[in-house]
Amino acid sequence: MAFLPLLGLATGSPQTIPAAIGDGWARASLAESGFDAPRFNALLTTLLAGGANIHSVIVVRHGRLVAECYQRGKDRGNYSIFAHVRDFGPTDVHDVRSVGKSVISLLLGIARQQGKLGGLTTPAIDYYPEYPELATPARKAITLEHLLTMTSGLQWNQDGGVLDDEHRLAWTRSPYRFVLSRAVVAVPGTKFDYNSGDNAVLADILTRATGMPWKDFARKALFEPMGITDWEWETDLHGRPMSYSGLRLRPRDMAKLGLLVVNHGQWQGHQLVPSDWIDASLRTRVATGFDGMGYGYQWWTGTVNWHRRVLGWAAAFGNGSQRIFVLPDLDLSVVVTAGAYGDLQVARRVNAFLKDVVATIRE
C-alpha cells in the first residue's frame, strides 16, 4: 500500500512522518532535527499542490529520515511517449534517469581506489586499441577527467528530441565508437556540454578496467554493501544497460546514496568510496552556464545561503526532476522523484525547493 501524505486537520499541511517498514532506517521528527516543522510543511504543501507532478520527497538529516511523502501521479518509462497514473510508496522503484551518471562516478572512485583504474589524465582513447584510426592528436587530448566533467569537446546534441544523440546512442550497434568518433569541436577541458555519451564511455572503461560488466561491479562494490537490493538498470534496443539514463531505484535507496556522499563515502563505518574522491567529485570544476550551477565529476554543484553563510551543495540530477541533493555542511540530503520529463520550469521549481528547505533549518 502506498504511504500517502496525511493532511493535518488544523493547518492543511502534510504530516511527513516516515513510515516504519523495517528497512533499517532510523527516524526522527523535523523539530528534533533542527527544522521549523510548520514552515517546512507549508512549503511542502505548496510544492505538492503546484501541479508539478511530484511523486516523492524525502529529507535525511544527521543520518535519520525526518520527512517522507508520496503521492499519486503520471509517469512514463524511458523513451516512452505514453504516461500512466500510478501510486507511489516507499517500496516502489522509480525511474531516476541521469542520477545513474553520478552512481557511475562513485563506482569509478571505488575502482580507482582498488588500483584498477588509471590516472585521470589518461587519454580515454587509450582504452580502445581496437579503434586505432580514432587515436588522433585531438582525441588523445580527451582524458578521463574531461569525460567526468563533460568537457570532452566532442560534438554532441542532447536537446531531448527523438533524433538527438542520446537517442541515437541507444540505437547504434557500436555505441562507444559512435561517441569517440564525434568531431572534436572544442579544446578538451574548456567548455561544458551536457553529454550522455561521455558517461557511456566512462561506464565501458569501468568494465574494461575492472574486468567485469560495470552493472555487476555496481552490485558487488556499492549496492550490496549498502543493502540496496531492489534496483534495475534498463537496457537499450540492443539489450545493453544504459548507464546514462536507465537506473531505477527506490527513493529511500536514493536517500542512502545521499547519506553515503554526505558522510564522505562512509557507510555504517565502512569506507565504500574514497573520501578524497567524494571531495573531488563535489568540487566545482566547470561552469555549466545553466542557472549559475557548476559541475564536478558527474555531480551538479551550487550554493545556498544559510544564516549569512554561503554553503555548497551537490546533486545527482535526472530528467523529470529526479534529484539527490547533498549538503555535507548541514549533514543534509533531500531526495525528489517526479514525472515532469522535459519540463524545465518544474526542474527549476524543484531546485528552488532545496533552498526553501535549507531556510527552514534553525540549527
Image (cartoon, rainbow, N blue to C red):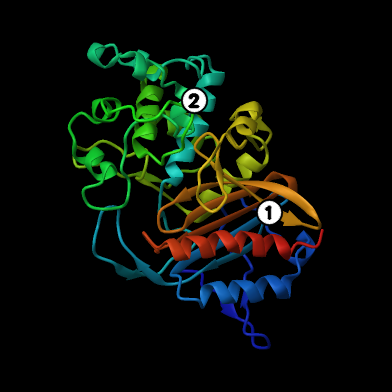
Image location (x, y in percent) of residue 191: 46, 35
Q: Is residue 79 left or right of residue 62?
A: left
Label 2 amino acid?
Glu
Label 1 amino acid?
Val
Q: Quadrant of the C terminus?
A: bottom right
Res. 242 image quadrant: top left
Q: Residues within 10 Å of mark 1 (few under 14, many from 20)?
A: some
Rendered position, 339 above or below 257: below
Q: Is residue 220 left or right of residue 287?
A: left
Residue ID for mark 2? 145
Residue at 54% over, 26% down? 109
User: Mark 2 and mark 1: span between their CA atoms?
Assistant: 26 Å
Residue ID for mark 1? 304
Q: Secondary structure at mark 1?
A: strand
Residue at 47% over, 17% down? 117
Which one is in front, 209 or 137?
137
Q: Which mark is residue 225?
A: none
Residue at 51% over, 19% down? 120
Image location (x, y in percent) of residue 45: 58, 76
Residue 130 visible in rendering = no
Image location (x, y in percent) of residue 76: 31, 61
Q: Secondary structure at mark 2?
A: helix
